[in-house]
Image (cartoon, rainbow, N blue to C red):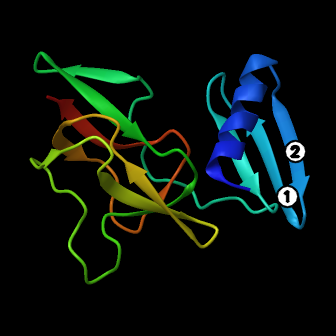
Amino acid sequence: MNLKEIKEMISLMNEHSLSEIEVEKGDLKIKLKKTTAQEPEITIAGLQPPPVQAQAPAAAEIESDTRKLIEVKAPIVGTFYRSPSPDAASFVEVGQDIEVGQVVCIIEAMKLMNEIKSEVKGKIVDILAENADPVEYGQIILLIEPT
């Protein structure tokens, strides 16, 4: 099961006002359950992810200092990594200019490394997640000022 299939399940939940959905594909079992009106809780193979210490606001964009900042949110539950390996340089740093399609981080989920790419051209304003920390679906991990 890939990220696209999980996103499709979330869309189905929203379209049909479902509060819970469970899918089995081979030996993989995924259960999606809404805990709030907007964000579903994802359980994979019956395991709960570790709790996240603090979460950023849930708005799609933040107005700050008359700048519009784009939020990059975690598309899946997993572990956030700033670089491809522990001894490698970070994908991005605060203040760095980025291009559309540039890898900004990796989220590891179920031993799969998922590259998260920028959807906008801009400058990294803040990195809200710490390296090797768990992230939740929809958690804001980066802020980008579009250019």
Q: Is residue 52 left or right of residue 83?
A: right
Counting residues from the start of the chain, the first of labels 2 and 1 encountered is 2
Left or right: 141 as drawn, with respect to 48? left
Q: Quadrant of residue 119?
A: top left
Residue at left offset 40%, top offset 30%: 57
Q: Are marks 2 and 1 in contact (CB under 8 Å)?
A: yes
Instruction: Name the amino acid type tagged 2.
Output: Glu
Mark 2, Cα crowd under 10 Å, few <14 / some 14-19 / many 20+, is few
Q: Is residue 131 above or below residue 55?
A: below
- What residue appears at the point 60 percent right and 73 percent down from the top-left corner? 111
Judging by the rendered image, the residue that carries numbered circle 2 is 22
Q: Give x and y (percent) for residue 145.
A: 18, 31
Query: In the image shown, does 64 or 23 lie closer to the viewer?
Result: 23
On screen, residue 102 versus residue 18, left or right, reads left
* Residue occupying image coordinates x 31% and y 69%: 83
Q: Residue furthest bottom?
A: 87
Q: Nearer the viewer, residue 84 or 74?
A: 84
Q: Position of residue 95 (x, y in %)?
A: 9, 47
Q: Secondary structure at mark 2?
A: strand
Horizontal and vertical percent position of residue 30: 80, 52
Q: Secondary structure at mark 1?
A: strand
Check disc 1 and give the amino acid type.
Answer: Lys
- Tell me if residue 108 comes above or below residue 98 in the rendering: below
Q: Establish if 119 lies above or below 128.
A: above
Residue at 87%, 48% in the rendered image: 23
Residue 29 image label: 1
Let me know if residue 34 appears in the view.
no
